Image: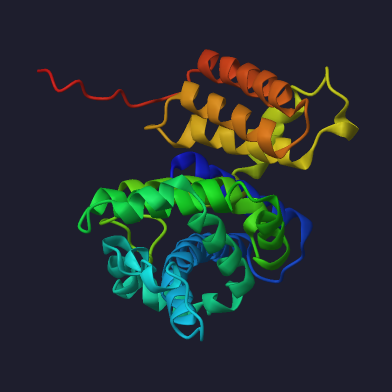
Amino acid sequence: MISRRNIRIKVMQTLYAMSTTENSESEITHGSRLLEDKLEQSLDIFTFSVLFTIRVAQYAQVDADMRANRYLKSDEDQNVSTKIAVNSLVLRITNNKSFNERVAKSKLDRYVNEDWVKKIFNALLQSPEYKAYVAGPEADRNADTAILQFVWEQLVLTNEEILTSFLDELPGWEDDSELIVMLMQNFFRFREKINFGELLDKNKRAYAHELLKTVVQKKELCMERIAGKLNNWDKDRVALIDILLIRMGICEYLFFPTIPTKVTINEYIDVAKQYSTPQSGQFVNGVLDNILKDLIKENLIQKEEKSTGKK
């Protein structure tokens, strides 16, 4: 569900939080707990995003009931489709044990604004896509998924007001919005394989914690390497995030033999551009590149070659 790039961002956010707050726990214990909290928060936001989309679909039944109770009914009131409210994906998710457990455990219903559900549903009613869906075959799993994806991507994500409300009311949305977009894309693509109980599989979780632990333990080693590369930069203006990303990169160079150095440097340049200053991409690139050259000269880079499958 989540990529190594997303994991790097989570580790960076955890290290940043550790560097700006005081705590009586050991660094590794504190960091591991913070990292788990951030992963759980991301899973909650993803689950909420699915929940909100499902609620918009289910509002078709609410709308139909209200129309049925009108004293004077129009032809439209008497021919309301509730197809989307019980489509195959809606039923699959609402019957998903891990989804229901996550919603209940984190009390995600409290973040669902019914006024926004109604507004998004009314926008859906007016769309050609919805009219085509209602007119289409009753049993079409691909169409069932496509209409919910349309709700999320074209009606929710393009609505600046609702995104602002998520930012104001949903803890972690600001940090995780890009990740949630990716997770929702995966949700619609792999709709039958989603586990709402775990954001990471065993191997990726181990990578996340090992990276965090290594960066904490090897701080002195990394800072010694970094110090010699700051001569051409204004040290007082170097962003904390940049230093954290460089420390992470050095640790991947030295202690994660299955990750190619090119992947490491490219990933941290991209993260720096997104999460730090306008000059950070260039800075991280220059420092990590120079440090890598030194490590190669010292024969300290030991990477495992991928098997080609040929004997």
| In-front residue for pair 261/293 | 261
Left or right of 247? Residue 142 is left
Q: Position of residue 179 (x, y in %)?
A: 53, 48
Whether residue 5 is situated above or below residue 300 in the rendered picture: below
Q: Residue at x 30, y 61 (%)?
A: 89
Q: Residue at x 52, y 62 (%)?
A: 121
* Colour mode of the rendering: rainbow
| In-front residue for pair 241/105 | 105
Give the number of marks.
0
Residue 60: quadrant of the picture:
bottom left
Q: Position of residue 109 (x, y in %)?
A: 53, 77
Residue 113: quadrant of the picture:
bottom right
| In-front residue for pair 140/3 | 140
Residue 61: quadrant of the picture:
bottom left
Whether residue 95 is situated above or below residue 34 in the rendered picture: below
Q: Is residue 242 visible?
A: yes
Q: Is residue 222 visible?
A: no
Q: Residue at x 76, y 29 (%)?
A: 227
Quadrant containing the C terminus is top left
